[in-house]
Image (spheres, helix red, strand yellow):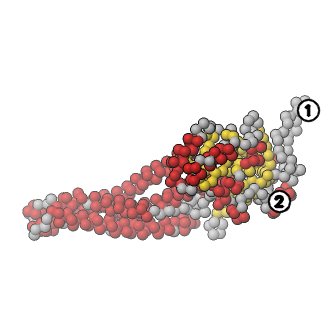
């Protein structure tokens, strides 16, 4: 029973840990793949490259690429600072400001499915809803500056200040802001154990964005109005990404007809190597780098693979402990059953027959432990969120902090092949640790075994 329980716990632990890691890995890969598309044609710096329409037309003029490329979308990306007020308290955040064309960006994927307003999922745009326009009109940010935007009194003898950076004197342009930028995560749980989000920016609220122009690196400032929220459930992106119309950002940064990257979506991802090779041939004289989304995120994906492999090795030591338990118990059984083994061999039992008894016993222990461990592991995986909630309510601590990934639930993904390999490994360990006692029992001399009986 001790051996069975040891094998069962080891198998269950491996299944649960692998399922959770697979869930996080799958969700992460899906998000990264969607946000970056299949292939990224990227400039070497934030100055970008010019004439993206001509480059896309040149790409689609190639018969092979035209047959394999489904959609392309130019983007202009730069770091910026965002400022807004919540209850008259100023907040400043660093962001990644991304200029896109909403229609073309939706075609390459990884955008509309993460928007919160249902109508934008089918018709993506930066237009404010009627309710947002009403709220925006009430703010009057340009007519009535909030206290934290007031300029400090200046010394009369000081030289006059430089001209202010350009800003729009008319209606602010709409933007789509990351969910974690516009919301605060309430760390106190509700009555049903659900974590609440406090909205700091409503649709129609004004934000001030400060960035730099592309040519002179001079600061530029503009006012925008929140149109919708981008929620990918990845805190790194939800707390950094802000999307604006690409034409507006190009004018703001004095980078007309320049972009920093082109996202490419393929009809068949298996054609990636051939498409990459052809794109590099066409763009060999351009200051761009052509990569797949996996190559662009290679360090992160490699770290996940290494972490998962090391964790599996460490967790297999639990089953190794069960194997040593089998070795110790079987060694004791051989010592206690010396007379019985001697009688069996005196009656004509072969060495292989005696070995078969102990190997079959080890195999049986491994099989029973694996079956029970698989059932336990799958049950825990299926109900892991309920178990986490119960443990959290008992201990008073949140085991799975939602503010790290902004996931509502712990993601799990059970791979049947992974479960099968865990079971095979556990059975092999159980049988392998039965070999030494089996050899010892098979090599017993019946005369010596019965000498003092």
**Residue pictured at 29% horizontal, 65% vertical:** 363
Per the image, the residue denoted by label 2 is 133
Secondary element under disc 1, as helix, strand or loop, is: loop
Secondary element under disc 2, as helix, strand or loop, is: helix
Label count reads 2
Q: Which image quarter is the N terminus in?
A: bottom left
Q: CA distance from mark 1 to mark 2?
A: 41 Å
Q: Which image quarter is the C terminus in?
A: bottom left
Query: Label 2: few (<14), some or many (≥20) within 10 Å?
Result: some
List x then y, in percent, for residue 225: 79, 54
List x then y, in percent, for residue 26: 53, 58
**Residue pictured at 68% horizontal, 38% vertical:** 47
Query: Label 1: few (<14), some or many (≥20) within 10 Å?
Result: few
* Residue 123 as seen in the image, left or right of residue 446: right
* Residue 392 as seen in the image, left or right of residue 248: left
**Residue pictured at 37% horizontal, 63% vertical:** 423
Foreground: disc 1 or disc 2: 2
Residue 122, quarter of picture: bottom right
List x then y, in percent, for residue 16: 46, 62
**Image position of 86 with respect to 353: above or below:** above
Q: Earlier in the sequence, mark 1 or mark 2?
A: 2
Foreground: 287 or 441? 287
Any part of residue 410 in sight: yes
Residue 110, quarter of picture: bottom right
* Residue positioned most to the right: 156
List x then y, in percent, for residue 145: 86, 48
Per the image, the residue denoted by label 1 is 156
């Amino acid at each position: 029973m001790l051996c069975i329980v040891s094998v069962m716990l080891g198998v269950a632990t491996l299944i649960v840990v692998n399922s959770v890691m697979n869930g996080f890995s799958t969700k992460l890969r899906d998000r990264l793949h969607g946000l970056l598309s299949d292939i990224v044609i990227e400039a070497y710096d934030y100055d970008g490259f010019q004439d993206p329409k001509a480059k896309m037309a040149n790409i689609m003029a190639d018969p092979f690429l035209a047959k394999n490329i489904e959609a392309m979308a130019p983007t202009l990306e730069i770091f910026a600072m965002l400022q807004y007020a919540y209850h008259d308290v100023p907040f400043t955040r660093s962001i990644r400001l991304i200029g896109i064309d909403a229609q073309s960006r939706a075609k390459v994927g990884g955008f509309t499915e993460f928007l919160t307003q249902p109508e934008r999922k089918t018709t993506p745009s930066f237009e404010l809803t009627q309710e947002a326009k009403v709220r925006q009109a009430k703010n009057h940010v340009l007519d009535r500056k909030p206290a934290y935007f007031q300029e400090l009194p200046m010394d009369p003898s000081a030289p006059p200040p430089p001209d202010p950076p350009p800003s729009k004197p008319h209606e602010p342009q709409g933007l789509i802001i990351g969910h974690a930028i516009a919301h605060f995560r309430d760390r106190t749980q509700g009555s049903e154990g659900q974590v609440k989000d406090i909205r700091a920016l409503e649709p129609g609220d004004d934000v001030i964005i400060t960035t730099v122009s592309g040519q002179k690196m001079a600061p530029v400032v503009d006012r925008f109005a929140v149109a919708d929220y981008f929620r990918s459930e990845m805190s790194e992106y939800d707390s950094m990404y802000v999307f604006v119309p690409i034409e507006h950002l190009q004018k703001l940064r004095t980078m007309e007809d320049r972009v920093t990257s082109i996202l490419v979506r393929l009809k068949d991802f298996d054609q990636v190597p051939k498409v990459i090779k052809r794109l590099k041939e066409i763009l060999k004289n351009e200051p761009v780098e052509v990569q797949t989304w996996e190559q662009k995120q290679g360090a992160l994906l490699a770290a996940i693979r290494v972490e998962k492999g090391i964790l599996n090795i460490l967790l297999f030591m639990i089953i190794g402990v069960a194997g040593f338990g089998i070795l110790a118990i079987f060694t004791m059984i051989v010592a206690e059953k010396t007379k019985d083994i001697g009688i069996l061999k005196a009656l004509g039992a072969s060495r292989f027959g005696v070995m078969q008894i102990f190997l079959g016993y080890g195999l049986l222990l491994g099989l029973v432990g694996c079956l029970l461990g698989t059932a336990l592991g799958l049950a825990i995986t299926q109900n892991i969120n309920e178990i986490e909630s119960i443990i959290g309510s008992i201990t008073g601590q949140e085991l799975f902090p939602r503010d790290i990934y902004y996931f509502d639930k712990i993601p799990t993904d059970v791979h049947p092949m992974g479960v099968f390999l865990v079971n095979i490994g556990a059975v092999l360990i159980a049988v392998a640790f039965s070999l030494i006692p089996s050899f010892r029992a098979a090599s017993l001399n019946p005369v010596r075994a019965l000498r003092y009986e």
